[in-house]
Image: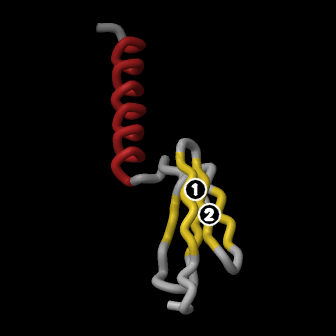
Amino acid sequence: MSRTTLLVIASLFVLLGGAVFLAQSGALESSGPTAGTNVGGTRIEAPGTRIESDNDKTRIQAPGVDITVPRDKNGD
């Protein structure tokens, strides 16, 4: 084998090893918006999530999801 071929093979191993390392360490993961409610500590992490809350209801919207949760009338 020529020196160039060995250099190309070695660089491919280095690149592949780096990609595997990054995938295992979670460095490539992107986190979406995080929202927490003040009661119960509910946490929602998803890209494209929108949370609207008022005195009557909480509405959670994400791609393919639309959830409306009414508030408890007795304040619990």
- Residue sitting nearer the eye, 4 or 28: 28
Name which quarter of the figure residue 53 lies in: bottom right
Q: Amino acid at mark 1?
A: Gly
Q: Nearer the viewer, residue 67 or 2?
A: 67
Cα separation between marks 1 and 2: 17 Å
Quadrant of the image occupied by residue 1? top left
Residue 32, x across and y down, in percent:
58, 56
**Vertical position of residue 23 compared to residue 55: above or below:** above
Whether residue 43 sits left or right of residue 55 in the image: it is left
- At label 2, which amino acid type do we have? Arg
What residue do we see at 37% from left, 32% from top?
16
Q: Residue at x 41, y 18 (%)?
A: 8
Horizontal arrangement in the rendering, residue 22 relative to residue 71 (left or right): left
Label 2 crowd bin: few (<14), some (14–19), many (20+), radius 10 Å: some
Q: Which residue is mark 2?
A: 59
Q: The residue tagged with tag 1: helix, strand or loop? A: loop
Residue 73: give its label: none
Horizontal and vertical percent position of residue 28: 49, 47
**Label 1 neighbour load within 10 Å: few <14, some 14-19, many 20+:** few
Looking at the picture, the colour scheme in use is secondary structure
Determine whether 59 is above or below 74 in the image: above
- Left or right of 53 in this view: 22: left
Residue at the spot of label 1: 32
Q: Nearer the viewer, mark 1 or mark 2?
A: 2
